[in-house]
Image: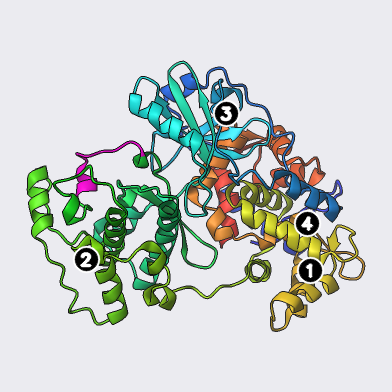
Amino acid sequence: MGVCQAKKQNQKPALPQKAQIEAKFKTEISGTQDVLLRRSNISPQEKKIFCDSIFSPNTEGNIVTSRQRNPISVLKIQNNISGLHTCTASPILETTSASKKYTIIGQHSSNYQISILQNNKTGKLVQMENFQKSNPDNEKYISWLQKVVLDHPNILRIIEIFQDRINYQVVSEHFHGNCLSDLIIGQAKVSKSLVSQIYEQIISAMQYLHSRNIVHGNLTLKSFQYIQSSNGGVIVKLVNLKGIILREEDNLEIIKLLPPECLYHQNLFTKERDIWTVGLIGYTLKKGQLPYNFSTNNTQQFLITIIKDHKFNFSKKKDLVFKNFLESTLAKDPQHRVDFETLLKHQFIKNHRIKKITQQEILLTNFISNKPCCTIQQLLLGYFGQEFNWEEYIAIQKLFSEADTNMDGLLSKQELIKIFSHYKKTEDIENKIQEIFQQLEVNTKDGGIDSTQFMSLALTRSTLLTQQNIETCFQIFSYNKQEIQLKGLKRHLQCETADIKYEFSQITDDLNTLNWQQFESIMKILLE
């Protein structure tokens, strides 16, 4: 889709090209008001937990919306909130319920027991899991969380712990990924390159735990979640921290991944146990299924017998490096298994490691690849970036500030050419920038692209505009109702420009509301 941004004037007609685009846009998403809207997925129990919570609009958000944003203020924002996703201390047990600080938005798609919350003051998304106080094991887990500091990019970060009369409420960073087990649904196989990427991140997380003398011992494929990354790979995180403390000795899914020495001694938690399990997880992804043949009605004793008697045969592996890697992790003698620190240096990991592309190169590639869009879409993309890819959002702010050498809050054509020449050699870059300026209707002589426009073009849309993210934001903007009110959306996006109201008129016959189908179309059209 091209730009549907309206000129700041009262005239309805726009430029011919733009009018055609807007008409097409309206046709694509019109006629949907009468369609039944998607129901909210909040359970009655969750509503009860948050019955005392009053939603507070995001009046202190940090979306860059001003047409003349001073880059100094952008850096100030960055410094003020850069610690939101960084754990530098153990989480403190608060003596109040999470409902005093957060509003429930929905549920995690991979685990219905985890709620998605929004901070009432900052608007930031987090997730929360409840642990009943009546369970002594939960008390043990909460006590452990208050003592340990875990800060690793491949381990889910715990932010805060709250409590009410019945539950402890553990709040963690928002990571809306899918379980690794989803990769092999229907016995689908994962490519060797992707397996290597997953191995490297899992091993890095486990090496970090082992370096702190923490053994997990209860790993399964569902202990890890992944999302697509901007470089075509995946980002993997260990999300099951409670398994470190809350042991499950009779869990068949855990038993299936146990090493031989632990089959009859399931309370034996050693580093070698984790090494075997991680090796078997990767091998299962590559094979598309476990190497053992189980039926659905197998007893625990039958499972143990099959696993104990199984003999791995890697002699037919043509890839000798991969063969050696598997033999290093799946050796029956635990003393022959290679530790995680050594595995990170293994040639198999090195051979498939994605060539490092700088963050600036990724952002500038996005800038010339993404289609320019209208004001509403620009602001919404900025919101998505802030909520679902914080690191990239901050990196774009930094890059904008670096490029804006005269500090006027705008990037001129020459400033953009200069920043490209510094980070990314691109053929015919001058003409490509000229085309972007024309689509955005920016004067190339004395004008420039503002921070909101730059943000909307530089963000990695494919990782932001997932179905789950779009649904989550609709729930936020509509306050879990069936329609987004224009007034509420403007408040969320901190924008009072007349462009918003005019663009609403191009999307729907109702100038003040936006339904689910229309909102979904507005966002998904950005992926075309």
Q: From the viewer's perspective, is residue 216 above or below residue 435?
A: above
Above or below, comparing residue 37 to residue 81 in the picture: above
Element type at mark 3: strand
Identify residue for label 3. 103
Mark 4 lies on residue = 451
Provide the residue span drawn in magenta.
245-255
Query: In the rendered view, does 365 fall on the left or right side of 264?
Result: right
* Left-right relation of 49 to 312: right
First in residue order: circle 2 vs circle 4: 2
Which mark lies nearer to you, 2 or 4? Answer: 2
Element at label 4 = helix
- Report the disc number at residue 331: 2
Q: Main secondary structure of the magenta part?
A: loop
Q: Secondary structure at mark 1?
A: helix
What is the distance, in whole Å, between disc 3 and disc 4 at their CAs? Answer: 29 Å
Quarter of the rendering containing residue 135: top left
Spatial distance from mark 2 to mark 4, Cα to Cα? 55 Å
Dot 2 or dot 3: first in sequence order is 3
Closer to us: 315 or 289: 315
Residue 169 coordinates in the image, percent (x, y): 48, 28
Measure the alpha-carbon separation of dots 3 and 1. Answer: 42 Å
Residue 247 on the magenta span = yes
Q: Is residue 288 visible?
A: no
Q: Earlier in the sequence, mark 1 or mark 4?
A: 1
Q: Residue at x 48, y 46 (%)?
A: 156
Which residue position holds label 1?
Answer: 438
- Circle nearer the viewer, 3 or 1: 3
Image spot of residue 383 (x, y percent): 66, 47
Identify the secondary structure beneath mark 2. Answer: loop
